[in-house]
Amino acid sequence: MKFQPNKFDKIIFDMDGVITGEYIYWDTAALTVYELLFSHEQFGKLDIDREWCINNYKELHRIIFSGDKTIKAVKNLGVNTNWDLAYIVFCVSRYIEPELTALDEWHFESVRMFIENIEAKSPEIYDLVGSLAAVATGHDSAYFSRGSSEVWKRLHSCFQKWFHGNGELKGLNELEEPILSIDKIKKTLQYLKDNGLKLGIGTGRPKDEIMFPINEWSLSEYFEPNMIVTYDEVLEAEEELASETPLAKPNPFVFLKSAFGDTLSNANIINKEYDKNSLKRIAVVGDAPSDIMAAKAANMSFIGVLTGVDRISAEKYFLSMNSDYIFDDITEMLND
């Protein structure tokens, strides 16, 4: 089916797996899990060599995520952010082997198989794996809880250091690449704007981390500033509203916030105090189950692209969820 831009007023893009590549983030998540499990400064007993880690991050990714099979399994649970990817793998690893002392491929294969057999979806998955890890290690569940616990604070700190660098070693963010050529991305975005569409972003990344590649690749001119919504806005809303339910995808908050820009308060959005008819002319572009789950929850149209980690599973899932469009990549939105 050809894309019909005249059916819409706004298009909201997820970024990772759609415009930005995801591998550097997954590599960072692997380094984070490795440090948390093995460093004596975290929860392990070893004196890890950070320079060795940077030089071998691809191998660590391969072992810790069983190739990309574990990432696919986590994505299929509706998990969106790479902090959550690291969190789930770390918690399941601690549950299976609380005193892991070696980088054992079979251990991480067990982690992968365990995750593949979990029936809980996001957000329930976080309480489940946190509770399992707590029981296995003799802590109360609050110690492992997602969002404000000691484990989460350390995980977040580790991730940011690997991604941004620590003063001595460069961060992996300097290696980030777009999912397609910049020329193809720009041509697609310009086509949509030329057809009168306003373009936004709904991403699980923090604002500084998504604006860095957008500015580096000269893409900022294509997006409405008040329609760029990131993890910063999600966290702000969770704190403001004292929300017990995570507002990250698959919750529709990030796409609704992008759709209405700064015209509505966070409370207005959560309480559904908005023009629901206007959502019929808004579409979300995404590559993962969490994207279509959030878009459908917001009553927006969905454009699935098969540039994520698992093309085959994504296509099947998009079909089962009645995706409005399914394209190989965003260039198929061009209708010339």
Image (spheres, grey):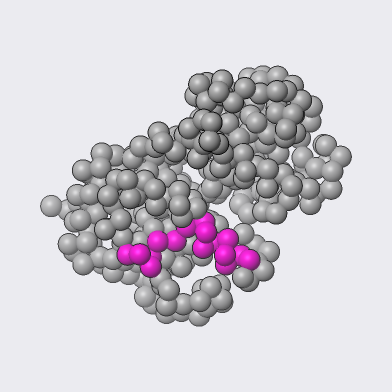
Residue at left offset 53%, top offset 31%: 168
Picture coordinates of residue 291, whole percent (x, y): 46, 53
Q: Is residue 46 magenta?
A: no
Front residue of 79 and 117: 79
Residue at left offset 41%, top offset 36%: 174
Front residue of 204 and 126: 204
Residue 294 appears anywhere in the view: no
SS majority, magenta: helix
181 to 232, vertically: above or below: above
Residue 231 appears anywhere in the view: yes
Which residue is most to the right?
Answer: 138
Which residue is most to the left?
Answer: 336
Front residue of 164 and 58: 164
Q: Which residues are magenta?
A: 224-239
Residue at left offset 52%, top offset 25%: 54
| Image side of residue 125 versus residue 334, left or right | right
297 to 36, vertically: above or below: below
55 to 86, vertically: above or below: above
| Image side of residue 285 versus residue 64, left or right | left
Front residue of 289 and 168: 168
Picture coordinates of residue 61, whole percent (x, y): 54, 27
Picture coordinates of residue 261, whole percent (x, y): 40, 71
